[in-house]
Amino acid sequence: EVQLVESGGGLVQAGGSLRLSCVPSGFIFDEYAIGWFRQAPGKEREGVSCVSSNNIITYYSDSSKGRFTISRDNAKNTVYLQMNSLKPEDTAVYYCATIRDYSLFGCAADTWVWDGMDYWGKGILVTVSS
């Protein structure tokens, strides 16, 4: 059974930091690109960031670039999203998701879309207070 279990969410003040973690199981982790989406109340789901299976290619949305850093540890089967300088508009449910990384095309602006993913986590809430 495939699972992606997110942790690290919670309530933080604006300007603060959080680190999200995602631990997948049930598939060969180092064959998949993996990363994060988010959905804020009343807004469409947004691709936030991803990292390729070989940990070389990364993608960041305009809203996350410069403040968030994604990393993966293939030995620990874990992906992290370090979120700094958080803003109230970062408040959302954050979802871990993954896609089989054929030819390292899985992590890119035009492929990191919700409907294209192979597996999704249940999501974790991040709330940033002003």
Image (cartoon, rainbow, N blue to C red):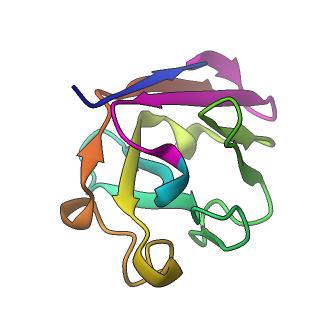
The percent coordinates of residue 52 (x first, y second) are 58, 66
> Can residue 130 be seen in this snapshot?
no
Vertical relation: 98 (above or below) 10: below
Vertical relation: 56 (above or below) 94: below
Identify the image quadrant of residue 45.
bottom left
Q: Residue at x 81, y 35 (%)?
A: 15
Q: Which residues are magenta?
A: 9-29
Give the quadrant of the N terminus.
top left
Vertical relation: 125 (above or below) 86: above
Q: Residue at x 59, y 38 (%)?
A: 88
Give the quadrant of the C terminus.
top right
Q: Residue at x 72, y 27 (%)?
A: 18
Identify the image quadrant of residue 116.
bottom left
Residue closest to the far front: 28
Vertical relation: 98 (above or below) 27: below
The percent coordinates of residue 103 (x first, y second) are 47, 83
In depth, the one of 51 and 83 nearer the eye is 51
Q: Residue at x 76, y 52 (%)?
A: 69
Q: Is residue 121 magenta?
A: no
Identify the image quadrant of residue 27.
top left
In depth, the one of 22 and 124 nearer the eye is 22
The percent coordinates of residue 13 (x first, y second) are 72, 22
Q: Is residue 13 magenta?
A: yes
Left or right relative to 64: residue 31: left
In depth, the one of 97 and 67 nearer the eye is 97
> Can residue 120 be seen in this snapshot?
yes
